[in-house]
Image (cartoon, rainbow, N blue to C red):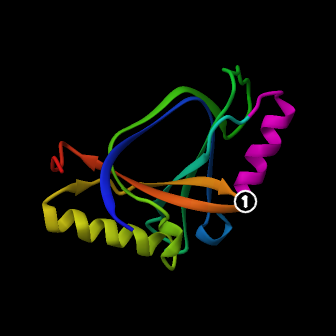
Amino acid sequence: MGIEMCSLVFENVLTYEVEQKKADWQESIYMLEDFTLNKDVYRNGPICFSFVQSLTDEKSGRFTYYLPISSPVVLADEGDFSFKEIFVLERALIMRQADQEMDFYAAYEKIKSYANARGIKLDNTYYCVLLEVYGDYIIDLYVPVIGQGDEE
């Protein structure tokens, strides 16, 4: 499970934002998938979500879910749903198959230790990319780098 520097780019992205408990992270995925069925658009990439820890509750935080879809959509009064033409993480540290850790936070802590040892400044937000393989998820964890980071 190595850590490396890379970027992440998705086009035509449906987003959904919610404040919720960390343990409930999968529930919003079903909402996002149902929403696409009602809008006649098709998923064409992995679901991704970002997480920002709540300052008042260590068990919850702000989740933003990203779902690449087949074509642009126009949304009117859709609540917590929105559309982005492009989603870009220019430079991030990535840990592939981070789900082999105890939880996302443990993987995030490993990336933070790696960055601290190399003088790399990281954003407080992390992104999980969920790759579906044979009915299970493989999770790649991305943590955006602030500034240039190192050139490894």
Residue 6 locus on image (x, y percent): 33, 45
From the viewer's perspective, tell me whether residue 113 is left or right of residue 80.
left
Residue 140 locus on image (x, y percent): 49, 57
Stretch in magenta: 27-42
**Where is mark 1, residue-wise?**
134
The residue at 68%/21% (across/down) is 71
Q: Quick one: which residue is furthest to the front in this view?
A: 134
Q: Nearer the viewer, residue 48 or 24?
A: 48
The quarter of the picture where the N terminus appears is bottom left
Name the element at disc 1: loop
Q: Looking at the rendering, which quadrant does residue 135 occupy?
A: bottom right
Q: Is residue 45 above or below residue 2?
A: above
What amino acid type should be assigned to the residue bearing mark 1?
A: Tyr
How many numbered markers are drawn?
Answer: 1
Residue 90 locus on image (x, y percent): 33, 37
From the viewer's perspective, tell me whether residue 4 is left or right of residue 67.
left
Q: Nearer the viewer, residue 81 or 138?
A: 138
Residue 34 locus on image (x, y percent): 82, 43
Q: Looking at the rendering, which quadrant does residue 15 occupy?
A: top right
Q: Determine if the magenta segment contains residue 28.
A: yes
The residue at 67%/34% (across/down) is 44
Q: Looking at the rendering, which quadrant does residue 24 occupy?
A: bottom right
Q: Please tell me how crowded label 1 is: few (under 14), some (14-19), or many (20+) other residues with Cα within 10 Å.
A: few
Q: Determine if the magenta segment contains residue 40.
A: yes
Q: Main secondary structure of the magenta part?
A: helix
Q: Nearer the viewer, residue 83 or 97?
A: 97
Q: Nearer the viewer, residue 50 or 81?
A: 50
The residue at 56%/51% (across/down) is 49
Q: Quick one: which residue is furthest to the bottom in this view?
A: 102
Q: Is residue 45 above or below residue 118?
A: above
The residue at 82%/29% (across/down) is 39
